[in-house]
Amino acid sequence: MRELMGEFDQRLERGKGALSIPNKIKVAGIVYTVEEKDVVIIDDCAGYVGLYNYKDTRIEILKDMTLQRKQETLVHEVLHAVLFEFGLKDHDEELVERAAQVLYQVLKDNPNLLGNYQTSIVQ
């Protein structure tokens, strides 16, 4: 078991695991483009690690982070997209951050959660 988890962690670090950063992700039938950026700007302010834009169906992730931080940020921004597509327009940032941290941990610690096969989410 320890050997398998070590292999999984190595695949993650190479960006080839189940939790690597995709170019696109589908939320409630809407395709969001995921972009890694040198700078993430919100309301003319730099210094952010992630951004979710429902109008442009785009998620931005700060490029200069470890893969793990990028993955955590992506889960956070996807959770914003889920809430918006669910019909909730105002999101409590603390709630989103806490839920995203736990969801990230569940996804990372259970790589076979959705089965042993991988298929393209976005066609």
Image: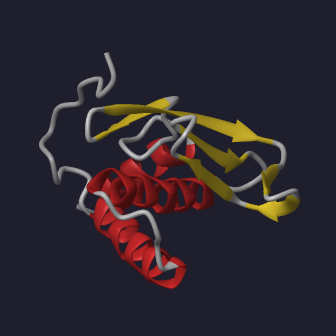
Say which residue appears at 69% left-offset and 39% top-offset: 36
Residue 25 position by quadrant: top left
In this rendering, the answer to whether 1 lies above or below 91 is above
* Coordinates of residue 2 in the picture (x, y in percent): 30, 63
How many marks the image carries: the answer is: 0
In this rendering, the answer to whether 2 lies above or below 97 is above
Side (left or right) of 68 relative to 78: right
* Coordinates of residue 27 in the picture (x, y in percent): 32, 42
* Coordinates of residue 93 in the picture (x, y in percent): 53, 77
In this rendering, the answer to whether 97 lies above or below 107 is below
On-image quarter of the C terminus: top left
Q: Residue furthest top?
A: 123
Say which residue appears at 87% left-offset and 59% top-offset: 46
In this rendering, the answer to whether 77 lies above or below 101 is above
* Coordinates of residue 17 in the picture (x, y in percent): 41, 41
Say which residue appears at 45% left-offset and 74% top-offset: 96
Side (left or right) of 111 relative to 32: left
On-image quarter of the N terminus: bottom left
Residue 60 position by quadrant: top right
User: Colour mode?
Assistant: secondary structure
Residue 120 position by quadrant: top left
